[in-house]
Image (cartoon, rainbow, N blue to C red):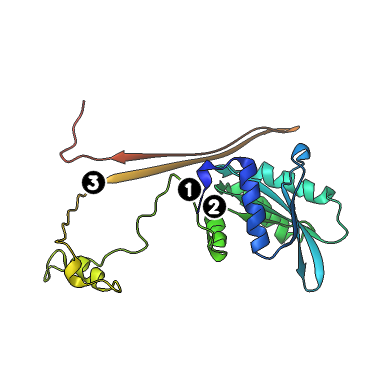
Amino acid sequence: MAVLDNFSGFEFEDLMEDVFRNLGYENVRQAAKTADEGRDILMEEVVDGTRRAIVVECKHTGTVGRPVVQKLHSAIATFDFDGPKRGMVVTTGRFTSPAYEYADRLEQNGDPYPIELIDGTELREIADEIGLDLYNGRIEILCDETLRPYDPAATVDAPVREAFRDIENMAASDLPEPHSQVTFRPVVSITAETNAVFETSVGVIHQINERTRFVVHAERGYPGSR
């Protein structure tokens, strides 16, 4: 089990190196730390008898924008490999819309250096395939299942007793008297996403890729003013 929040950027690269090896990629190695040119991990794959190089950029951050993908595209083009090449950006967070649009355009235009984007959700799914449990310290999974809705015709603790009976090698008599309590509190979650690029005739001068989230908890009572 690995807590992504506790990783440094270099430790995340070490982790991804192990992940790619377990996925069956060949010749997996890290690029020199002192000469980062937009590539962190180098590896190879064989598709239809043809060996292809893959240049990987690892980003242990909340949001990855288009400039990172563009930088990787240049790194792939200059990478010395006698054969086809492609790229991959892996992040523990998420990609902005411009980042996805840039990668999609490369694929649609038949660019010789396509780039695959893997966000935090996909990364966890990939880790599950190889038996590695990755999670973010800010997120806690309490249960994979929920009890069925309460049936007014039965007792309140009926769902608990039913779930308890399904446990193997456990006598039903060992179940203590269940205590159930439910508190409903209205909650509103608001997410604001800003993706803006300020350009002049000479190019990009400033770019904003931000995601702000806040949660409002309501209390019992009537609207009022202060």
* Quarter the C terminus occupies: top left
| Residues packed near mark 1 inside 10 Å, few (<14), some (14 to 19) or many (20 plus) | some
Check disc 2 and report its element: helix, strand or loop. helix
Image spot of residue 117 (x, y percent): 63, 54
Residue at image location 86% in from the left, 56% down from the top: 81
Which numbered mark, 3 or 1, is in the foreground of this view?
Answer: 1
The image shows a total of numbered marks equal to: 3
Q: Secondary structure at mark 3?
A: loop
Q: Position of residue 195 (x, y in %)?
A: 56, 40
State the residue at coordinates (14%, 64%): 156
Residue found at x 78% / y 39%:
35
Say few, some or many: other residues with alpha carbon within 10 Å of mark 2 (under 14 / 14 to 19 / 20 or more): many
Q: Which residue is mark 2?
A: 120
Sequence order check, earlier mark of 1 and 2: 2
Kind of residue sitting beneath label 3: Arg
- The residue labelled by disc 3 is 185
- Do labels 1 and 2 touch, CB within 8 Å? yes
The amino acid pointed to by label 1 is Asn
